[in-house]
Image: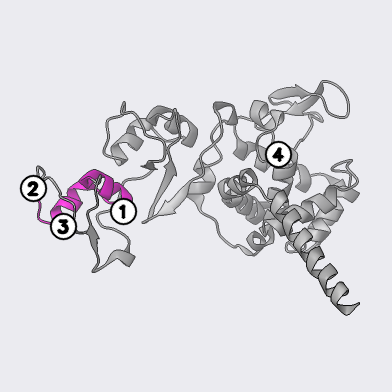
Amino acid sequence: MRKLFLVTIIFAIHVISVFSQVRWNAAYQSYIDLYKDLAIEEMIRYKIPASITLAQGLLESSAGRSELARKGNNHFGIKCHGWTGRKTYHDDDESNECFRAYENVAQSFEDHSKFLARQNRYSRLFKLSIKDYKGWAKGLKACGYATNPRYADKLIEIIELYELHKYDNANHYDKFISKHSSTGNASLGRLHPIYKYNKNYYIIARAGDTFKSIGEEINISYKKIAKYNERDRNDKLIPGEVIFLKEKQKKADKAFKNRFHIVKAGESMYSISQYYGIRLKYLYKKNNLDANYQIKVGDKLLVY
């Protein structure tokens, strides 16, 4: 009997694990990576847990893929309610209901914060600890934010599955990422996550990307982006290549101090400079190489 009990417990744990894996998906994680700094910024300004903002954005916008998010950058399902700005219409509880529309995602996040902070029915939530995500989730449902009876449970599940509560402990955020990851218009297509490396920021190019399309999304001059990457503004981009968003450094990250880069087949001085996030001329200079030097497989290059 004891053996059967243990088998049952092990099976139950296995089932729970499988279901957790099923619920997790890459689109949700990409959304979190893209907007976590924006959510932290809103938390610092308006005292709303970043975990709650992210969970609501994920749930209400289907990780930025909903029609409201794509058509109107509305990530929180907020209806017009006397709104005088841009509007979009969508079938919800009733057909063709009026919803708020925004120029970009940053406006949606800020309006969500103001929507909660300035309405009396949500005032009791601000008496809760900023780390009490369960209280906030249950309070949002109790205050009438959504009609779904499992709304609070869904928010809590998302927060715990993706460990969003860790962002509630943050006391600072990356201003560059917050600004440039949220000013793009979702109608232009799926936005690129911004990553940090060697005191710089970069995105990974996708099929169809150009310097111009990236510039429009990130809200940085495409001519500057091309210059930062030491390329012609009209160059064709290859899916998977790194595109830096600020001027590259003079040397690699400190982790590569006193270490050589061993040249591999297919590499060029340019590809190596991009890999380490350093300007091409400094890669030549560090290694006392002429600009016309053709590297060979096995060459040892200093990068720091």
Residue that mark 3 sits on: 286
Q: Would you say the magenta stretch is mainly helix, strand or loop?
A: helix
Q: Which residues are magenta?
A: 268-290
Q: Bin the neighbour count of mark 4 within 10 Å (Cα to Cα): few under 14, some 14-19, many 20 and up.
A: some
The mark that comes first in sequence, 4 or 3, is 4
Image x and y of residue 175, in percent: 50, 50
Task: Specify the amino acid type for callout 2.
Answer: Asp
**Residue at the bottom extreme, as displayed:** 2
Task: Specify the amino acid type for callout 4.
Answer: Ser
Q: In which image quadrant can residue 197 be found? A: bottom left
Residue that mark 4 sits on: 62
In space, the residues marked 3 and 2 are separated at their CA atoms by 11 Å
Q: Does the residue at mark 3 contact the one at mark 1 (Cβ under 8 Å)?
A: no
The mark that comes first in sequence, 4 or 2, is 4
Above/below status of 286 relative to 292:
below
In space, the residues marked 4 and 2 are separated at their CA atoms by 53 Å
Q: Nearer the viewer, residue 170 or 205?
A: 205
Q: Bin the neighbour count of mark 2 within 10 Å (Cα to Cα): few under 14, some 14-19, many 20 and up.
A: few
In space, the residues marked 1 and 2 are separated at their CA atoms by 20 Å
Q: Is residue 269 magenta?
A: yes
The mark that comes first in sequence, 1 or 4, is 4
Q: Residue at the spot x=59%, y=31% of the render?
A: 186
In space, the residues marked 4 and 3 are separated at their CA atoms by 48 Å
Image x and y of residue 115, in percent: 76, 42
Residue that mark 2 sits on: 290
Image x and y of residue 177, in percent: 50, 47
Task: Specify the amino acid type for callout 1.
Answer: Tyr
Q: Bin the neighbour count of mark 1 within 10 Å (Cα to Cα): few under 14, some 14-19, many 20 and up.
A: many
Q: Is residue 81 toward the left or the right of residue 183 in the image?
A: right
